[in-house]
């Protein structure tokens, strides 16, 4: 789980009214402002971005300046190696709803973790799943999630790995969420012992730098509108709503009109649940995103799915966001 600081959390602040820019055609003029980066994030290859941990307490991050309220998010990732080093890809809201698309362990070349949290509730640790993945530290794998009001589905390389229905005892996230990627040391000696155990052991900084590589990050919003708002207005609670749009307005028919790609300045280039982990501890002491703070394999959770090739529907407008510029591309799916 990746801890993070938010400007305003209406679950703890009775005067907080959250206003999140939505991913829509109105954002096309903002160019590279679709995403912000912090820490060591560099374009060292024409095909991918490098996020590097070069010294203790580094926490490089990429995060969207927009939020989505239901949608599809995917990215190709080659995770960083190193004991206790975590490559994270997730969605997170101001009130700490969260979907961990992939937490990839630098000391484990065989699997990753999926997870979800509701309003920052970390009182139990039974939401996560551990899934086999081919060579996550040596090759790129495409991790994806589809989030709708009725379910969350996780994918790797086009195959369904896990499906979670909204009828589960915890429900599913329902607040607008940003897209985030981060690299952090879950095994840092200053972390709680449970966190270090979960991360795979104490981080060995002698092997630095540790580098996470990302490419072809795609985000699709299933709602319409320009802003998402929720929280307290004049001492009255307002549930998430869309300004000039409809929540879930594109769900079902996949009439997707807004998506965003993040890539470098130049072109592209069996579900087994791991047994033996009883906790997925929250990270303490980090101000950026270690929570997450979360394809050829059979689906996790027997009977919940088949090996499905993920797609974005009949058609979509895709806004390709480069590191320093935007290129608009109409793609017929």
Image (cartoon, grey):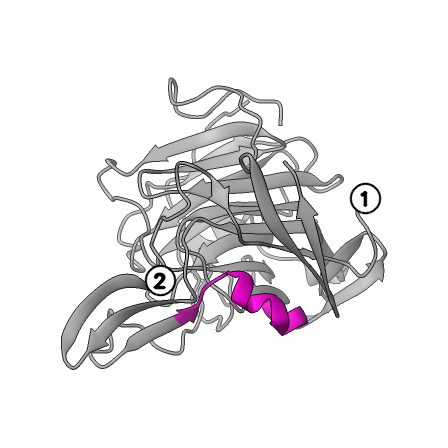
Q: Position of residue 105 (x, y in %)?
A: 59, 46
Q: Position of residue 108 (x, y in %)?
A: 62, 40
All told, the count of numbered labels is: 2
Q: Quadrant of residue 232?
A: bottom left
What residue is pinned by disc 1? 269
CB contact under 8 Å: marks 1 and 2: no
Report helix, strand or loop for mark 2.
loop
Instruction: State the CA–CA distance, disc 1 to disc 2.
Output: 34 Å
Is 26 contained in the magenta span?
yes
What residue is pinned by disc 2? 96
Earlier sequence position, callout 1 versus callout 2: 2
Say if residue 57 shows up in the picture.
no
183 displayed left or right of 284? right
First to last magenta residue range = 20-37
Please tell me which residue lies in front, 112 or 328. Answer: 328
Please tell me which residue lies in front, 290 or 325. Answer: 325
């Amino acid at each position: 789980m990746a801890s993070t600081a938010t400007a305003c959390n209406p679950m703890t602040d009775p005067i907080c009214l959250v206003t999140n820019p939505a991913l829509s055609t109105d954002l096309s003029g903002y160019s590279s402002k679709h995403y912000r980066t912090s820490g060591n994030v560099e374009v060292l290859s024409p095909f991918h971005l490098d996020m590097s941990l070069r010294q203790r307490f580094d926490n490089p991050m990429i995060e969207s300046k927009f939020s989505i309220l239901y949608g599809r998010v995917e990215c190709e990732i080659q995770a960083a190696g190193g004991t206790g080093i975590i490559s994270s890809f997730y969605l997170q809201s101001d009130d700490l709803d969260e979907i961990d698309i992939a937490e990839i362990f630098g000391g484990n070349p065989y699997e990753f973790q999926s997870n979800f949290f509701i309003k920052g509730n970390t009182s139990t640790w039974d939401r996560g799943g551990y899934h086999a993945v081919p060579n996550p530290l040596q090759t790129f794998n495409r991790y994806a999630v589809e989030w709708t009001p009725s379910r969350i589905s996780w994918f790797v390389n086009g195959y369904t790995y896990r499906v979670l229905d909204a009828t589960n005892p915890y429900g599913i996230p329902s607040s607008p969420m940003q897209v985030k990627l981060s690299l952090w040391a879950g095994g840092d000696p200053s972390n709680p012992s449970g966190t270090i155990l979960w991360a795979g052991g104490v981080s060995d900084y002698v092997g630095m730098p540790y580098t996470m590589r990302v490419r072809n990050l795609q985000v699709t919003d299933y709602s319409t509108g320009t802003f998402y708002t929720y929280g307290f207005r004049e001492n009255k609670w307002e549930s998430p709503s869309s300004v000039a749009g409809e929540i879930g307005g594109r769900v079902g028919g996949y009439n997707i009109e807004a998506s965003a790609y993040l890539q470098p300045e130049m072109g592209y280039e069996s579900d087994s649940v791991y047994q033996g982990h009883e906790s997925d501890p929250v990270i303490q002491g980090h101000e950026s995103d270690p929570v997450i703070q979360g394809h050829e394999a059979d689906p996790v959770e027997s009977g919940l799915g088949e090996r499905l090739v993920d797609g974005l529907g009949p058609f979509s407008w895709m806004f390709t966001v480069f590191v320093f510029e935007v290129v608009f591309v109409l793609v017929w799916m």
